[in-house]
Amino acid sequence: GAGGSPPPPPPSRKAAAETWLAPWAAEEGRANELCLYFDAPVTLALLRLLNYSRTPARGVAEFELLIDELLVYRGTLRCAGSEASAGDRWQSVLFTDDEAT
C-alpha cells in the first residue's frame, strides 16, 4: 500500500475465492499443517489471518507458526462469524514494532 502501510484485506466476496479449507485431521494427536515455501529469503512483518466462518466449529482455535523449524508464535484465532464486520474478521500477528506496519 501507499506510504508503507499494509494492503487492506480483500473484500468479502473476493476473500472466498482466495481461501481454501484444509482437511480435518481426525486422528487423535494429529494436527493440520499448512506449509509455505519460498525460493529466496523473505522478511515477515505481518501475518494476516481469516478463520473459517461457514461452520465455526470447523475453524482454527489454536495455532503455531514455525519458521525454519523454530516456533515463533503460538496463539489463538478468533472465529470469523458472519455477524462481524469484514474488517473485524481478520486477525493480525505482528513481527515488528514499526508503527507504520
Image (spheres, grey):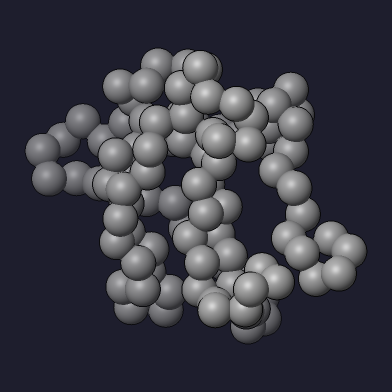
39, above or below 36, in the image: below
Residue occupying the far left of the picture: 28
Residue 70 % position (x, y): 33, 78
Residue at image position (37%, 43%) is 77
Residue at image position (62%, 78%) is 98
35, above or below 15, in the image: below
Front-most of residues 37 and 3: 3
Front-most of residues 54 and 19: 54
Residue 36 seen anywhere in this rendered image of the structure: no
Residue at image position (31%, 73%) is 71
82, above or below 72, in the image: above
Residue 22 % position (x, y): 44, 35
Residue occupying the far front of the picture: 99
Residue occupying the far right of the picture: 2
Residue 87 % position (x, y): 63, 36
Residue at image position (31%, 48%) is 76
Front-most of residues 37 and 49: 49
Residue 97 seen anywhere in this rendered image of the structure: yes
